[in-house]
Image: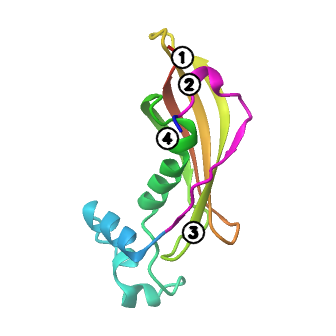
Amino acid sequence: MAGLYYEAFEVGHVFHHDTTRTVTETDNLLMTTLSMNPQPLHLDAEFAAQTEFGRPLVNSLFTLALVVGLSVQETTLRTTIANLGMRDIRFPKPVFAGDTIRVETTVLGKRESTSRPNAGIVDFEHRGINQRGEVVCICQRAAFMLKKP
C-alpha cells in the first residue's frame, strides 16, 4: 500500500497501524554501537542490573525510529518529500528487549506549502505503545507531503 497524498489527510484522523514489532537485544546493540553511544545502561547487563530498571534499556533513539517507521506504510510511503522536523519527543515508559511495539498516529494539522504548489505540510503525532498498553514514545512530526499529481 502506498502512502497518502496531502489531500487525503484529515485533521483529527487517528491511524491504528497494523504492523507491530518486537524489539530484540540485537536491535538495541546495533543502534547503540552504530551511533557511538557508550552508555552502559544500554550495553552492560551487569551495570543495568544495578539500576532501578534491573536490565538494559533499549536506546531511546531506536524507539523513536521504530515508532516513526511503523507509521510509514499507511501514511507517507512514497508520498513524502521530506521530514521537516520533530518536536515534543517524550519517552514516558522504558522499552526493553522483548517488548512489542504498536503505533497510533493522529493528524494534528495540515497546511499548503507557500513555496511549492505541488506540496503541503502535515503535522502528525505518533504514539508508540507496548504490549501492556503503556505509551513508551510520543513524537510530533512535520512531514512535507506531495499533493495528488
**Which badge, 4 or 2, comes first in the chain's sequence?**
2
Residue at screen point 60% across, 47% down: 126
| Residue 129, horizontal then vertical, whole percent | 64, 61
Q: Secondary structure at mark 2?
A: loop
Question: Badge 3 is on which residue?
Answer: 100
Query: In the rendered image, which quarter is residue 124 located in?
Result: top right
Looking at the rendered structure, the kind of residue marked 2 is Tyr
Query: In the rendered image, which quarter is residue 52 located in?
Result: bottom right
Looking at the rendered structure, the kind of residue marked 1 is Lys
Cα distance in 3D space between marks 1 and 2: 6 Å
Question: Badge 1 is on which residue?
Answer: 148
Is residue 121 shown left or right of residue 108?
Answer: left
Question: Badge 4 is on which residue?
Answer: 86
**Which badge, 3 or 2, comes first in the chain's sequence?**
2
What is the span of residues highlighted in magenta in the rendered image?
3-22
Q: Most extreme residue toward the right, as rendered?
A: 12
Cα distance in 3D space between marks 4 and 1: 24 Å
Vertical arrangement, residue 79 with respect to residue 70, above or below: above
